[in-house]
Image: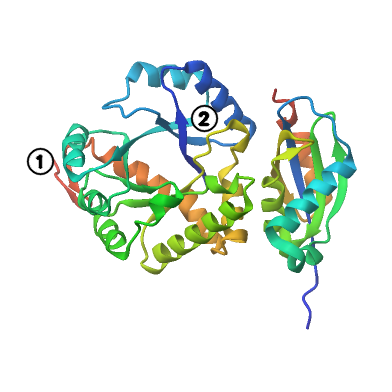
Amino acid sequence: MPYFESKLKVDLGNLKDIKEKLIFCVKLGINNVILEPHNELKEIDPKIKAKIDDITSINIYYRINLHIESVKEFKKKIRFYNKCSEIISIESMIPEVLIHAARDTRVDIISFSNLNLLKNLSKGILSLVNQNNSFIEFTINSIMTDNKTYQSKAFRNLYRAIQLAINTKSNYIISGDFIELYDLRNPRVLASICHTILGLPLSETKKALSQNILSLIKRAQSRQNRFLFEEGVKLFKKD
Amino acid sequence: MVDRERKRYILFKIIKEYETEFNKNELINVIWQSIWRYFGMNVANKIGLWIIDINFEKNYGIIRCSHKTKEIMISALSLIREIRRKRIIIFPIKTSGTLKKIKKVINEINYFNID
């Protein structure tokens, strides 16, 4: 089962830094990584992708994360990603933006990458995400903190949010989102941590770190296929 | 009837930020601290932790635990962040029920030669 680190933030202008991070991933036995540029790009330059591919043998995928503060801003920004082959994720503190994002087929992930964002997760958003076959993202970067109070609080919120997602049978993924190099961990280990500390079934956590991410990548790539209208509806050429 | 407790051997790799030197006792202390912090006494008494082998030159080690606490042990090892205030990663590579298989993996995989 291939496991994914689905959120590794990088500066695409700094190849040395990317190389360092990817070599470290190899050391940790991480074979599949989704890179996220720091800044919101409209498109990732194929030349940079080729350069990164030359650095490593790891399977690399890309995602673009948009920080949105209003519905108007969301509508304005999302127009640029109609046929984007990268994974599109949205982060917002505003519940209305999240509802709009969950309805939009161009959005692949609604990301809840920190404690404050988790407060906005609701059954309504999960239901819309289900209808759209998109994904919810939870990150467990809070495990790597020395502050025990913050850590306990973060785990509690994460536990509640993931339980809500499981109860509504929503698609969700778990990512590391570690900033420091020495905080990085192998995704299989993250599955163990979620199982033992958050009390989630091991099969569920493995699915969130593997199968669901594969489906997510497939979903993003299928946007490029002009014969595919939506899931289950494909135009065949008459021979 | 009580289930028979089976053993699990975990092969792990140590990645150090600097050439930090520490001994076996310090490593055991750090592992127990991690178990206590995240899982507490309730779990700590069920683990049956034993260090089988530790190689500081090649940065790997083997520990033994009970089969029921395998996942807990993997989590506790990975949640260790530092020794002597220097960053460290203890990364489980392989879990097996026999020591023979673990030693076979050590010989087969060239994991420990990655710089």
2 or 1: tag closer to the N-terminus: 2
**Residue A222 vs residue B40, the one in the foreground:** B40
- Say whether residue A64 is visible: yes
| Residue with the most extreme bottom position | B1
Q: Is A149 displayed left or right of B7 in the figure?
A: left
Q: Is A17 displayed left or right of A230 in the figure?
A: right
- Which residue is at a point 40% across and 18% down the rendered structure image? A50
Disc ID at residue B71:
none
Name the residue that disc number 2 marks.
Answer: A58
**Residue A29 vs residue A142, the one in the foreground:** A142
Q: Compared with residue A217, is residue B69 higher up or lower down, i.e. above or below? A: below
**Mark 1, secondary structure of its residue:** loop
- Which residue is at a point 39% across and 21% down the rendered structure image? A49
Give the class, few, some or many, for how many residues have Cα within 10 Å of label 2's Cα (few <14, many ≥20).
Answer: some
Relative image position of residue A149 (x, y in whole percent): 60, 55
Relative image position of residue A202 (x, y in whole percent): 56, 60
> Residues under labels 2 and 1: Cα distance?
39 Å
Relative image position of residue A109 (x, y in whole percent): 33, 46
Q: Quadrant of residue A222?
A: top left
Name the residue that disc number 1 marks.
Answer: A238
- Say whether residue B109 is visible: no
Relative image position of residue B96 (x, y in whole percent): 75, 52
